[in-house]
Image (cartoon, rainbow, N blue to C red):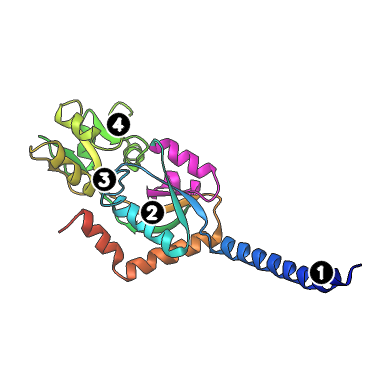
Amino acid sequence: MNPITRVFNVPTQALFCKLCLCLSLLVAHNARAESPVIELHILDAPPLTFVNDPRGHGIVGDVAMAAMNRAGYTATIRVLPWARAQKHVSEEHDHLITPLSRIPGREERFTWIASIMPMERAFFSLDRKVDSFAQAKETYHKIGVGLGSAQEEILRTEGFSDEQIYTLAIGDNPAQMLLMGRIDAWFNGVPESQYIWPKVSKRKLLMSPVGSNADLYLACSRQCSGKMVEDLRNAVEALRREGAIKRIHDVYLPE
């Protein structure tokens, strides 16, 4: 071998090895630094969740996003019809969904991470106010509820007939149907109804006493990473302690 080649060959090989080691360490560091990307399923149900709004993703949507960011996860937002979204998430692995009420019919289908806010529900009508489920059952022939919503299951559990339960796309559709006289009442969450109605009509909306209360959760697929559940649960509780959830709430529903 040429002496000159011998002189430069060893240092060159050492330099090359050091360069490879540095590159591999850099790749490993970047891999660790990258946040896991997780599907977050929401729907357009203002003010709880928004799909397109300059302020953000709504009360529950913003809390979920803040918790994910705090816990080191990156969200990719998915919007499907609500009943389909629930089926999809429940059958997948490590997919998130919100806002989801924790009711008996859903208990075994999801992993319940953390409650974000309470959700009071009531009957809304234009001319016949009721005081109870029993009175509503006797008074209203058609009651509008969001398709795939907790309200639908609650009414069925309370013994309302299929003929009385009129499912509609979630959003302002039930409010519009009530205004047109196509339904007699609207059974829905109080904050959502009070937010939507002024945008639909100036007519006075009659509200029954609260008939149901089931918290809105950030939930995950039934098969969900235990670490992610713990990370997100801790993040939501930290946001609550710090007053961040209350501040987010006040952005969309100022007192």
Q: In front here: 16 or 98? A: 16
What residue did someone put label 1 on? 9
> What residue sits 66% from the left and 68% below the top?
22
Give the label on residue 46, or none: 3
Q: Mark 3 or mark 2, which is nearer the start of the sequence? A: 3
Alpha carbon distance from label 2 to label 4: 22 Å
Circles 2 and 3, Cβ within 8 Å, touching? The answer is no
Alpha carbon distance from label 4 to label 1: 76 Å
The image shows residue 41 at horizontal and vertical percentages of 42, 45
Q: Secondary structure at mark 2?
A: strand
Give the label on residue 217, or none: 2
Q: Quadrant of the C terminus?
A: bottom left
Q: Mark 1 or mark 2, which is nearer the start of the sequence? A: 1
At label 2, which amino acid type do we have?
Tyr
Neighbor class of circle 2 (other Cα within 10 Å; few <14, some 14-19, many 20+) is many
Residue 154 seen in the current view: yes
Magenta range = 82-110
At label 1, which amino acid type do we have?
Asn
Residue 184 seen in the current view: no
The image shows residue 66 at horizontal and vertical percentages of 37, 60
Q: Mark 3 or mark 1, which is nearer the start of the sequence? A: 1
> What residue sits 48% from the left and 39% below the top?
87
Alpha carbon distance from label 4 to label 3: 16 Å
Asked whether 218 falls inside the magenta stretch, the response is no
> What residue sits 71% from the left and 70% below the top?
18
Alpha carbon distance from label 2 to label 1: 64 Å
> What residue sits 25% from the left and 63% below the top?
247
What residue did someone put label 4 on? 168
The image shows residue 117 at horizontal and vertical percentages of 31, 57
